[in-house]
Amino acid sequence: MADTVELSQTDHGRRVVLPPGATLLVRLSGQPGTGYSWQVTRCPANLTPLGANQEGGGLPGGSAAQVVSFRAEGPGEGDLELGYRRAWEKSVPPAARFRVTVAVTA
């Protein structure tokens, strides 16, 4: 079975090394009831986005974790960036950012 690596806000700015076929889970907290969500703003060519889901957030205005998953493909290195923003506010800078450098090595 391929490796799974999970990252959170505390990993912002890190460099992560993955083998091909590994799954990368980025778990970031937010408040979905405000309209904000974590959106991928930059993804290196060697990662394939697999989707996103939400954990928690059952109470109105409560916090929840958004989990965005990726699969490591071929070798290479690049920055993965996510921005915390409202989808309809395209010209407004993200309220928060998350960035890691991802290296996929054999």
Image: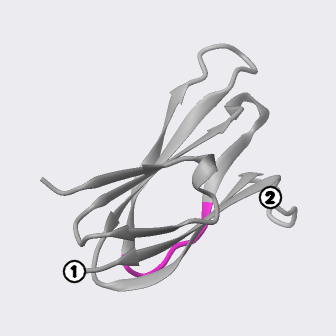
The disc label shown at residue 87, or none: none
Residue 86 showing in the rendered view: no
Q: Residue at x 27, y 82 (%)?
A: 74
Q: Is residue 77 above or below residue 14?
A: below
**What's drawn in magenta, residue-wise?**
40-46
Q: Position of residue 82 (x, y in %)?
A: 63, 61
The disc label shown at residue 106, or none: 1
Q: Mark 1: give few (<14), some (14-19) or many (20+) Cα within 10 Å.
A: few
Q: Which residue is mark 2?
A: 94
Judge left or right: residue 12 versus residue 61. left
Q: Position of residue 29 (x, y in %)?
A: 64, 37
Closer to the chain start, of discs 1 and 2, is 2
Q: Residue at x 30, y 84 (%)?
A: 75
The residue at the far left in this view is 1
Could you tell me which secondary element the residue under label 2 belongs to? loop
- Choose top left, top right, bottom left or bottom right for residue 35: top right
Mark pair 1, 2: CA separation: 34 Å
Residue type at numbered disc 2:
Pro
* Quarter of the image with the C terminus in it: bottom left
| 1 vs 2, front mark | 1
Residue type at numbered disc 1:
Ala
Could you tell me which secondary element the residue under label 1 belongs to? loop
